[in-house]
Amino acid sequence: MALGTPGPPVEADTTGDDGRPAAVPRRPRRRRLRLWIPLGVIAGYVVAGLIGPVLARYDPIATSVTDRLRPPGSRLADGSLALLGTDQVGRDLLPQIMQGARVSILVGAATLLLAGVVGAAIGILCGYLGGVVDAVLMRLADIQLAFPSILLAVFVAAVLGSSVTNVVLTLSITTWPIFARVARAQTLATKSRDFANAARTLGAGSWHIVRHCVLPAVASPLMVIATVQLGFVIVAEASLSFLSLGIPPGTPSWGTTIANGRDYLASAWWIATIPGLVLALFVVCVGVLGDELRDRSDPNLSTR
């Protein structure tokens, strides 16, 4: 065999000293669990948000004095079962949480879509053109990133007012620099690669290079960033709703439900605690999923 010529693949010895098969490493199994368990939980939230409000109707103006502040598992006056209890005006918490899941997930998805498209367009433009355009827009992004995002969101929401559309616009304004930074860095690394230079040498225009060379390289990192940012966006939406600056009072959300129970923590803990736990579980699962997708998409990480 010539020196430097790769030989046939050598299979790893999977037997122990006693001749019995060695234990299979459990690391790939943990990696699969880190991916599929958060995906299953998030899928459950999505199904609950889509189907739950249809099965359990929620009336924001309905009140029932006899059913107010009932603990979880109580029977209501109409014979129905309040699995998660009732709030201070007698409304069942379960329909509120399911309706809040729909609102929060829709707000998060719309915010990431708008911020992702705008941020990716600005980042690709800055990375590909450079010069004055890159300097001005990236300095604007740096200034915005240096300012606390929640304070900026509170300021913008206070100016625009309370509505679902305004919440999406507010959170998009505070989120686009993250997507722009990632898209710019990936564009700078891609436009000088051999395949991009080859396309440029063959006479391809800038739009062709951006569409066929830059966009495929930018798409994967942006998807990972969007998954990571989803949890932060939903927490920001809940924070704005908690401060009465986000979703209008007639539309239930997790932040509004938690705010309704802050005065009853001693007597009716479930009003604020259960929606808080639901929100925390969703954010944790989104964070774990984002970390796992980041590890899988980065070939330089040793955990892959």
Image (cartoon, grey):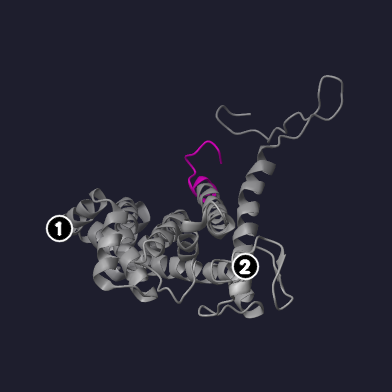
Q: Which residue is mark 2?
A: 94
Q: Is residue 126 above or below residue 82?
A: above
Q: Say which amino acid is labelled 2.
A: Leu
Which one is in front, 34 or 214?
34
Which residue extends farthest left? 132
The kind of secondary structure element at disc 1 is helix
Which residue extends farthest front? 66
Within 10 Å of disc 2 (Cα), the crowding (few <14, some 14-19, many 20+) is: many
The kind of secondary structure element at disc 2 is helix
Q: CA distance from mark 1 to mark 2?
A: 48 Å
Q: Which mark is residue 136?
A: 1
Which residue extends farthest right? 19
Q: Which residues are magenta?
A: 292-304
Q: Are marks 1 and 2 in contact (CB under 8 Å)?
A: no
Residue at the spot x=71%, y=78% of the render?
A: 78
Q: Is residue 66 above or below residue 14?
A: below
Q: Tell me the quadrant of the picture where the N terminus can be found.
A: top right
Residue 90 x, y percent position in the rendering? 59, 71
Which residue extends farthest top? 17
Residue 139 x, y percent position in the rendering? 18, 53
Which one is in front, 105 or 229?
105
Which one is in front, 54 or 134?
54
Q: Is residue 88 above or below residue 264?
A: below
